[in-house]
Each structure stands twice: as C-alpha cells, then as structure tokens.
Image: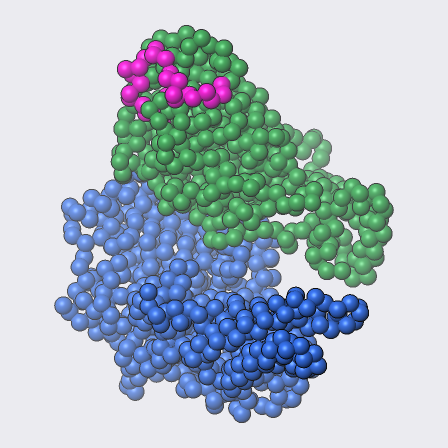
Amino acid sequence: MSLLDLHDLTRVSRRRFFAGAANTIGAALGTAALADGLSLRPLVRLLSGDEHQPMPHFAPKAKRVIYLHMEGGPSQLDLFDYKPGLYDLFDKDLPESVRNGQRLTGMTSGQSRFPVAPSAFRFNRYDNGGDGAWISELMPHRGSVAKELCIVRSMHTEAINHEPAITFMQTGTQQPGRPSLGAWLSYGLGSSNRNLPTFVVMITQGFGNMQALAARFWGSGFLPSEHQGCKLRSSGDPVLYLENPPGVSRADRRAMLDLAHELDAEEKVRTLDPEIDARIAQQEMAFRMQTSVPELVDFAGETEETIALYGENARKPGTFAASCLLARRLCERGVRCIQLYMRGWDQHGSLPAEMRKQSEAVDQPIAALLKDLRRRGLLDETLVVFGGEFGRTVYSQGALSRTNYGRDHHPRCFSMWLAGGGIRPGTVYGETDDFSYNIVRDPVHVHDLHATILHLLGFDHERLNYRHEGRDFRLTDVAGKVMKGMLR
Amino acid sequence: MDQDAIVQLLGRLHPMLLHMPIGLWVGVVALEFGGALIRRAPSRATLAILTWMAALLGAIAAGSGWILGTSGYHSSTIELHRWLGVGAAAIGLVTAACGAMQNRDAFRLLLVLEFVVLMAAGHFGNEETRGKEWLLEPFQKASAGTGTNTEVRDATQTDAAPPADSPIAPTTDAADVAPLIPVLPAAEQQSALQQSAADATHDPKPLFPPVEPRKPIERDAVPTRVAPTQPTPSTPQEAGKPVSFGAQIEPILKTYCASCHSGTRKKGGLRLHTQAAILHGGENGAVVKAGDAANSPLHALLLLPPDDERHMPPSDKKQPTTDEIELLRLWIEQGATFDVAEQPEPSPNAPVKDSADESKAQETAAAPIAPWTTAAQAAMQALQAQQVHAARVAEGSDDLWVDFSAVAATMDDAQICAQTAALAPWIADLSVARSAAADATLAACASMPRLRRLDLRSTKATSEHVKLLLAHPCLQEVVLADTAIDDSCVEALLALPSLRHVYVWNTKLSERGIARLCLRNGLTVDVGETAAVKVAEASAETAVPAPKPRNTTCPVSGSPVDLRYTVLFEGRAVGFCCPNCPRSFWTEPAKFPVADR
C-alpha cells in the first residue's frame, strides 16, 4: 500500500468506519507494522500525514502574521478616512443619492432622518515618504510610523452585523464552520517552533460596547484540530495547569504521556480517527509549553527603554500593551500567526468619549510594536494587519451634537492598514466618496484581503485548499484577487 | 495587409485543417462499409456530400501543408509526409469522382486506398512534429531497464561510450568530475582568512561535504548509460578550461534561439541576443542562475522531453546536440560570465598552492551545484527533531530556511556550527538570533554558497566575526541589530558585493560608521527608527557624495559599469557590471587591473 493510500485513509469517513472496512485495514496495518519491526509511533506519524505538510508555493515575503482585530467595527471616519468636506454638512441630511436605497441595520432603519456627523477629531497629515497620510488625533503614535503603513480605505464586506462579519473576516464565509485565517496559515506554513502553538490568540477587554467573541473565530473548522488558535489567558497563568500538580515530577508526566500515547496509537490503528493524532500532538505541545510559556511571558529580560516604548501598561498582563509586547516575543520565537483582539469598538452612541479611551489603549502599543519589530529586523518579514469587521456610518445614530454622536454599522467601506513583510510602505490605497459611504476607487473585498495575505506568505490562494466532504475548500472560496497595488 | 503574411497564415492553418478530411473520410468509410454490415444502404446523397467535402477539404489541407512545408522544414520524414499528403488529396478527388460516376467497385477500392495513404501521411506528420520515438516511447521506457535499449538521442556519444550492454557505468564520484569544473582563481587572501577561521574553531575539516556531480535529469532514468558529465574524449570542452561565451555559447544561442528570441522577436518577453538581454530574462524571470544550471531555464528547458510544451527549442525547430547542451550547462555552472576575451592562462610563475588549498578551492567552486540528496533530507529531519526549524523556502526549491528561534537560548556557537554543517550547501536564510552564535558560526556562514539572509540579532557577533564573512557573494541581508559590532566592520560589510539591507539598531557603530555604510549605492542601512531610511537619504545628498567608481568598464568582464555594483576596495570605489564580477575580483584583485577613467 502506497503512502498516498495511507494518507487518504486517515481522512476516514463515518461511513467507512461503520462499514467495518476500517477494522480490516487497521488490522492489516498493525500486522505490517509488527512485521517491519516498527514501533507504532512512526506509523502514527506516517498516518497523520506529516510528510504531506503543504509548503509555500513560492518564496514568501512574510514569514509570519500579527493580526490586530478591532472587534466592534472602529469608525473609519474618526481614524483614517479624512473627510474635511463634512464639517460644513453638520446635521444636514445624508443625500438619498448617496445611500441609494442600500440596506441599513434594524438599529437605524427606523430613524426619521440621517443627519451627517462630521468627526469630532482633528486630523493630522503625517509624512509617509509619499503623499502623506491623514490620521486622526486619536492615533498620534500611529502617525510616527506612518512611513511603514499601507492604509487601505476601500475595504468592504458583505455582512452587516458583528457575528457574521467577524466570521466572514476570519474564515472567509459568513456561516460558522470554516477554518480561520490563522488555521489555514498554520496548516499551510507549519510550525517553526514546536514548543509553542503555531497560532496564538490574545484578547483584551475594551471600554465600549462589547460583543461576544466565539472561539470558532480562531477555530480550525474541518482542518485537523491542532491548527486551531491557542488562546492565551489575559490574567493569571496564560495557560491553565502550567504547573505540574504537587508530587508529580516532569519525568512522571512524561511517562504518563508515553503510556497514554501508546494506548492512543492502538486506538488509532483500530479506528483510523485523525482526531487521535491531533489529541496526541496537543498533549505533547502542552507538555513542551510547560517550559516554553513561562519563559515567553517573563518580561524580566526586556529593557526599561522597551517597556517605555510600549507604555507602562505593558507590565500589566492582559492589557493591549502587554499583548503587543508578547506578540513581538512570540514573533521572535517563531510563532507563525498571532492574533490580538481588542474588544469594544462598537460605538452606537457616545462615540467620541469611547473612541478616545479605545484609541488610547491601542495607539502607543501598536506604534511601539511596529518600531520594535523594525529595530530588530523583524518587520520586513512580519506582516502586521490592523482592522475591524466593518466600518461605521457617516450619519449619526441617535442624538447628534458637535462633540457627541453615535454611528451605526457600515459594511460598504471601512479602513484597515497593513505593514511589514512585502507591503508597499507609506501608501494610501483606495478611496471613498465624500461621505465615506461608497467606494470610488480600488475596492478591496474581504476575499481580496485574504488572497493578498496568503500571497505575502507564499501561497496561491487558489491552491491552498483542503478536501472535505467531497470537495476542495479554500479560504477565499471562489473569489479573491491579490491586490498588487498594496505590494512592494 | 501583407500578402506573404496571408500565405504564411494559410500554411500555419495546416495543423487545424488537416483533421477535417481525416474525420470525414473515416465517416465515409463507416457509411460505405458499415452500411453493408448492417444490410441497410446509406443514403446516396449523404455519401456524396460527405465524400466531396472530404475530398475538397483534403485538397485544401494538402495545399496549406505544402505552404507550411516550404518554410524551413527539411527532413526525410517531411518529404514522405508531403508526398503522401498530396497523394491522399489526389486519391481523394479521384475517389469522389468515381463515386459521382456510380462506379461502386472502383469507389470502394479507392476508398480503402485513400484511407491507408491518409493514415500513413498522418503518421509521418506526427513523427515530424513529435519526434520519431514518440509513438513507441512507452514501450521503450518499459524495456529500458533491461539494458538492451539504444537511445537515438545519445547517438553522438555512442562511439565514445562503452558498449551499451556494459553492466556497470563508470564511477561518478566527485574526483572524476573535478577536472571539468574549473578551479576558480584561488584567492590567497580568501583561503588564508578561511584557514584562520577554521583554526579558530579547531575544525580543520572542510565545511563542505564532498559533492556529487549533478546529472541532467533526463538521463537519470537510464542507469546503464554513461552520465554525460563524464569527461569522455568526445566532450568538446577541454577538461578544466572555462567555457567562453563569445566563442562557444553565443553561436549556439544564434543558431537555435535567435529566430524567436532576438531583436524585435521576443517570445515570452525573452531575448538572447545581447548580454544585457540574457541577464534581463523573460516574463517568467531570469533564465540564467549563475552556478546552477538545473535551475536555469536556459539550460533546464532543453532537457525536458520534446513533447513537453515548455521544451525549447520547440520540437519543430532544429534541436541542439548533446554536446552543445553540455557546453551551455558548463557555462552556467562556471558562473555564466560574459568575458568576451579569453580568460588569461594562469601565469607559470604563480606560487604553487598546497594541496589543501587546492581542494578547498575546488569545493568552493563545486558547492553551488550541490544536488539535493537523501543525506541532506536526513540532515534536515535531524535538525527538525532538535526543534530547529528547517524547511524549504517554497515547493520546488532546494533553498532552505533554517531558524534556531525555538531553541536559541540554549544554543552555543559550536552547536550551531555542528547542526548546520550538513546542510551548508542549501541554506539560503539562516536565523541564529538570540543565540550565542559567534566566530565559528560566521566562518561557517562564509561557506554557505546560497546564503542570502543572515539574522545575527542579539548574538555574540563582533566586528572581528563579521570579517569572517569574507566577501560572501550572495549575502543580501544581514541583521546585526543588538550586537556589539563597531566601526571596524564597516569595510567588511562594504566588501559584501550583494549586500542590500543591513540592520544595525543598538550596535556600537558610530554616526560616522553609519554614514560610511550609507555611501554604498543601493544599500539600505536600517538603524531601527522609522527615520532610519532618512539617514541614508540625508547623507546621500548632504554629507559626502556617493562614491563614483574610478573606472567606467568592469575590470572583470569589460562591460560598462552599473553604479549599483560599486564596491569599495582599498579605500577606492571600483565599479562592476553585475553582482558576480566583484566576487571574481575579490578572489584575486591583482588579476584584474582597474582601468582608471
């Protein structure tokens, strides 16, 4: 039986399992293994398809990704999409020709009028080595790294509410169940540090209205489950049960795992269930993390100067600053995909006050992260992505004053930025109309963003796929274009 | 519109047109005889229409074939095809006429004849476009293992080769092949430094494992045949002599490639008529990868089977001989230089090198062609088992990315050396950041022929260690951030001919040292602030003007200088034409006098 057949067998279906065929084949395999004098462990590795690990289709520009997801949908109008023309239109009705009957959420579709709410914040033009980048006063530190950014003002998505929109942003489809971007990358790239998970997720609590974050946003869907994101806890031990219980030594733990694996391997030969491999891999990972994680989260080696760069908050675990510093340390240790969630960007009301707090929490750490990566020569091979799941409306939700307003969800345009590995620095990509309502130039769909990210990591998004339920799936489904204009 | 062009177009429609009459004649035969078989006569009108259509289309196909045949096809096969085709067309017309005259017996007889002639014409046409062996190739492949097969393509070699039934091919170890690979002008300077590096590590063992010769892909399948890399007497190239571009390579390109790839004709965006054009490559990128013929399309595409659509020259064009392909391979392996003049013979007064130096130089020369071996695969897996990341950069590439980041804190200099030694020929991207890497690692890096990126961040590397990199020919990016390097390594960095990006945040480099680095054209000096690039820009226009090379022609090749490849040598700026020439220059500067402007 060739290697290929064996590999196919590992994707055993329920039907085959129940048909009993698996038992016969399993017995045959077991005999073969004994006859060859092999121990079961290499056989299990063989079956788990390690040898079939996909690899980049071409030389990648970026070796890893830091994805900063701003949960809630930060307002592009108050951060990166400068619309000075709106100041004169304060409290005027949004022209019907702009909205043109497009769908609104149930939260504002009942409003009697849609008054234009210009940003309460001043914008500064920062030198980015090109035409300059307009960034709001909420992000003063971001201005200092404007040279590194490729600001995309023409993102658009299909979903209008958080749950499906985040699902879409993270998995390429609005329905739950598909693998997340990080899981695809883990599957495609493999680990470059087997002592840590390939895909790490950290969550910071925000100040505004927060939506639930489901673990499937970093789930592995139908991909083998070792590719799912590993969430580091924001308080206490970053990973539960990091310490061995009293009376159990590391050698005891090892012996216990070895025995468990032997039993698992027997079960694997009997049932050909690929999840057994995932479980073995995860137990082994957990064992190694017992030593690698304490070293990872120990900031004692960081200089005062570095801490000052990220801000004093970097000393408090769970803050966005601490997560950013941890992200850099994960980068240095070869973790391929690091995702930071900042919650609380859902400003339906009291937008200016809430945005101020939200921005304060993320601005300096993010700028520090970019600077820190730049210094260490890591930025040129690390892709950094910043953005939410959608944008916000130009019209005010609820009461409107010069200094207080709210904004509803807006999927038709929003701003993100990318920096680092292979991205053309100091650029502003795409353009929206005068109301930041519709896109007028270079639209970038979520699938396009995914295709571009995969491209930078060395993958043709049409070829990174996985066979499941009888057909090949990919992150970009049947769409997606690589946005050449964003590339170096 | 040009009348000639229309005629040519008609000719080129032949491959399309010819299928129509064939199909129709098959139809006529089926109707005529199939009808008899099932005892139901076919409709006479149908038969007449089909027959006339087949005959007329056959005549048209023959006509267009005749036109196509006049444009540069000369072989016995094509003559046969030509006359069989014309014959088929003529017989077809007569057949149709017989049919019209209701002469049933003559019609049937002619129909059979037509069918046979048509098939024969088709067969020879096929042979012309696909090659003689094409049809029966599957059988030949199957019997190749028996050793009785004689390959037509190797006819040029058979006289020199041992009899085909000779059971064992001559050995193919490195020693046999060595004379074919020219000994690069050995650099006293380089080898001395290398020696000192080796002494420092108490490891006098050469850093490269012996390298097996690379065999052209195609021939690996036939184990009993002589590998063409063998220095057999029939090889036109005198052993050890460098291939000359002007005298040997250019004529080959003119003969076989120029009709599609020169002047205004640039299929695939590629032109091969000048040095610049060859270096520029085509729309799919470079066609020549110096030192690596197997990955140079200019050579590799010639080795593809003739029916592969990427095979070059196209199978209907004149094909280069095995010797000519071998010459191309040698030329690329020797670095694909364009020295118009013959390289000077080594002077008889040159100091006699000791044998150790000799072998080292040979290894250095042989290193870039190291083929991926099972031993390398095993070494890679061993490294992975140590939790060191080692993987190919991308599918189809032998370049390796080796990253010690997972275990950096526990790695010392000697361990890194030991672990990378077996993979040295393939490592293109090495990160030893945050480890205790120092002199031994850097000395090892100097002999990684493909190394393009080296990450030494937060290691124990010092200026003295950086000097051990010598003038590494391919190193493009070096991360020295957070190390103790100082101004004394600036010259060593500037000596790296391909260096494009150097990261020097948190080092002991002074402003002066950084400014000096910034003088180098095309080098980004990253001091770690986003303003870093600014330093480079500012110094370029204010402090000191960028050094102008003192020569206008490349001292190695004699071609015009490209400002991007300006290298500081003994405090003076010397310009070169390409990134390869500084490498030759540095190995023996005395050999290449710099002509002052």
* Residue A417 found in image quarter: top left
Point out residue B168 in the picture as x, y percentages from the top left corner. Answer: 63, 85
* Residue B46 found in image quarter: bottom right
Q: How is the image coloured?
A: by chain
User: Where B487 falls versus A339 (above or below)?
Assistant: below
Instruction: Tell me what residue is drawn at x 47 percent, y 74 percent.
Output: B64
Which residue of the protein is positioned furthest toward the front in this rendering?
B101
Q: Is residue A17 left or right of residue B290?
A: right
> Between B462 and A45, which is closer to the camera in this rendering?
A45
User: Where B570 falls versus B412 (above or below)?
Assistant: below
Q: Is residue B551 left or right of residue B584?
A: left
From the image, state the color of chain B: blue
Instruction: Tell me what residue is drawn at x 33 percent, y 68 percent.
Output: B2
Point out residue A475 in the picture as x, y percentages from the top left corner. Answer: 56, 40
* Residue A175 found in image quarter: top right
Q: Which chain is green?
A: A
Report whether residue A360 is seen. Answer: no
Magenta segment includes A95: yes
> Between B457 and A378, which is closer to the camera in this rendering?
A378
Point out residue A238 in the picture as x, y percentages from the top left corner. Answer: 57, 29
Report whether residue B64 is seen. Answer: yes
Start and end of the magenta stretch?
Answer: A78-104
Magenta segment includes B545: no
